[in-house]
């Protein structure tokens, strides 16, 4: 059995107050926030491999996290390493328009960022899915 998967979690959702009756996290999330926003919420699922040590990649992601947190429509991010060494970046967006706008802007503003340069572009697979159930 290999090392435990790495996990980075970032959530920004100041517009959506945490439900005080059923808090499940110290931050707003789909499970403990009022759900009207989730009717259109979108999951962005990106898989890829990196060309640097994991600890360097995770450290370099601080810049990406800060950038994402400032994007309109950003809800949360989970970054995880699979047993085979590949990565999953799961990002929640308010809708497809905000996800696509962020992706376009990211390519314009952050392509030279160390975290982006660490990714092997030939391995990137991005998909989007509308969120239907969240608990």
Image (spheres, rainbow, N blue to C red):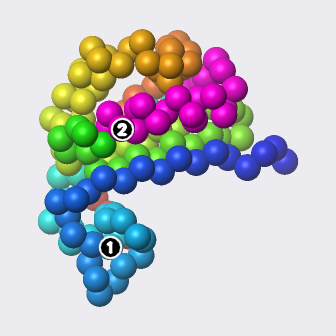
Q: Which residue corresponds to mark 2?
A: 66
At horizontal 41% and vertical 76% (from top left) the residue drawn is 24
Which residues make up the magenta segment?
A: 48-68
Badge 1 local density, few (<14 within 10 Å), some, or many (20+)? many
Residue reaching furthest right? 1
Q: Is residue 11 magenta?
A: no
Give how far across and how far down residue 30 sits, in percent.
31, 64
Q: Nearer the viewer, mark 1 or mark 2?
A: 2
Question: What secondary structure is found at the residue carrying circle 2?
Answer: helix
Question: What secondary structure is found at the residue carrying circle 1?
Answer: loop
Quadrant in the rendering for residue 20: bottom left
Give how far across and how far down residue 98 sits, in percent.
18, 37
Q: The C terminus is located in which quarter?
A: bottom left
Quadrant in the rendering for residue 108: top left
Magenta: predominant secondary structure element? helix
Give how far across and how far down residue 72 sits, in percent.
18, 41
At horizontal 50% and vertical 24% (from top left) the residue drawn is 115
At horizontal 30% and vertical 43% (from top left) the residue drawn is 69
Given residues 83 and 5, the one toward you in this image is: 5
Q: Is residue 44 left or right of residue 2?
A: left
Please tell me the numbered disc located at residue 32.
1
Q: Is residue 73 left or right of residue 2?
A: left
Decide: is 95 above or below 125: below
Q: Is residue 123 left or right of residue 3?
A: left
Give how far across and how far down residue 125 sits, in percent.
45, 25
Label 1 to label 2: alpha-carbon separation: 23 Å
């Amino acid at each position: 059995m290999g090392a435990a998967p790495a996990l980075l979690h970032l959530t920004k959702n100041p517009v959506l107050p945490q439900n005080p009756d059923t808090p499940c996290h110290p931050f707003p999330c789909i499970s403990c926030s009022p759900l009207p926003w989730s009717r259109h919420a979108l999951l962005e699922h990106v898989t890829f491999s990196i060309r640097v040590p994991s600890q360097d990649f995770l450290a370099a992601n601080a810049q990406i996290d800060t950038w994402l947190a400032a994007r309109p429509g950003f809800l949360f991010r989970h970054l995880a390493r699979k047993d085979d060494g590949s990565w999953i970046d799961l990002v929640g967006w308010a809708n497809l328009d905000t996800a696509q706008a962020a992706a376009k802007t990211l390519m314009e503003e952050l392509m030279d960022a160390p975290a982006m340069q660490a990714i092997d572009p030939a391995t990137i697979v991005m998909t989007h899915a509308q969120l239907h159930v969240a608990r």
